[in-house]
Amino acid sequence: MKQTFFTAGPSQIHSNYTTYYQDALNFNYGSINHRSEAFHHIYQHTDEQLRTLLNLTSSHQIYFAGSATEIWERMILNLVEENSFHFVNGSFSQRFFEFSELLGKKAISIHADHGQGFDVSTVSIPSNTELICTTQNETSSGVYMPSSDLVTLKKQNPESLLCTDLVSIAPISNLDYQFIDSSFFSVQKAFGMPPGLGVWIVNEACLSKATHLHTKKIFQGAHHTLLNYAKNYAAWETPSTPNVVAIYVLGKIAEEMNQKGLKQIQAESKVKAEMLYAFAHQSAQFEIVVKEEKYQSESIVVLKCNSDNAAMISSLKAKGLHLSSGYGLFKDSEIRIANFPTTSIQEVQQLIDELSMF
């Protein structure tokens, strides 16, 4: 039986993942040294493809980590001496805030209720804030922060660094990177890969801040510092041995996405999201958690269930359709449907047909 994963992550594997993975093994990329010329070519190719796909500025550099969670810690340690400000509208943005507290920073947060977004024009951020931490797409609640809001935040706070979590929206987002100092994602969602690789994007303003903290002898971590990343990046290398095979596969998937075109990928994602929300609007069994349309995520659709969600998830799984339950406090009352490029319009329609039976 065919298995289709609409899970919020890890999610559906890219249709050509196994081909690219096997190619990497055939080329012995699992055994090459990360200081070798072969790895230099892999890193450079993946950098070029991601740079094109995401429309990065020339100021931005791309680094690789073990996960997005690791990047939370690296970012706080390397970009914050004392003060960070966090927009919290779900479990993952809350955890990012908690990381800053655990690392001894003076973290401030503004909270939105479950399913709610922020009116950023009314948010007052202290002038001494070094890093503004946002989550463009909150995987736990399906709340999206419009790219225009991120632009507004940067324009209102030009002296602060602005970062955003893109874990469940990259590369679908239409983010304008000239206003984003740092962003990050992991590959097990929209890129259709198994977990184990985080991607960290930083600009020159971040490197200047890291240099300033280094000069002041502020502790920036005993593992990899931002400046070490930058030093190695200049030679297409990493501070320590990375997941070479995953970096190669990511480059090939990004290349394939570039050949298709991001606008086409975005258009298909929009169609699928509209199908799911239109179904939920007319269904007596489901209620859309994010009420305000401009905050509704296209990539993570969260629905409140008016019946037993566990039985529903189990029934669909028996038919080869996999969904995620709600997250945290909402585990037993919601379902989360991932709408990533790895699932087709036809597969989304099949899911809707099955959901209509409840």
Image (cartoon, helix red, strand yellow):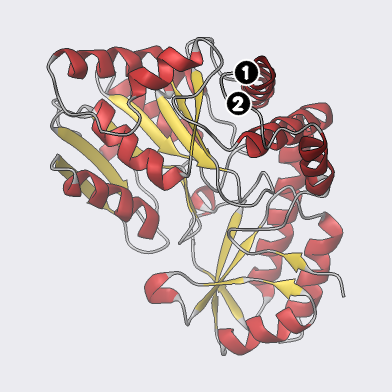
Q: Residue at x 13, y 32 (%)?
A: 82
Regarding residue 284, the answer to whether it shows in the image is no
Question: Residue 33: which disc?
Answer: 2
Residue 345 at what x, y percent from top left? Answer: 82, 56
Q: Pick the quarter of the image with the N terminus.
A: bottom right
Element class at badge 1:
loop
Asked if 142 appears above or below 102 in the picture, the reply is below
Q: Which residue is drawn at 46% across and 61% down?
A: 141
The answer to the question of whether label 2 and label 1 lie on touching residues, with beta carbons closer than 8 A, is yes
Element class at badge 2:
loop
Question: Residue 206: which disc?
Answer: none
Residue 279 versus residue 249: which sits nearer the camera?
A: 249
Residue 78 at what x, y percent from top left? Answer: 27, 27
- Which residue corresponds to mark 1? 36
Q: Residue at x 32, y 26 (%)?
A: 225
Relative to residue 49, is residue 157 drawn left or right?
left
Regarding residue 181, the answer to whether it shows in the image is yes
Residue 175 at what x, y percent from top left? Answer: 54, 30
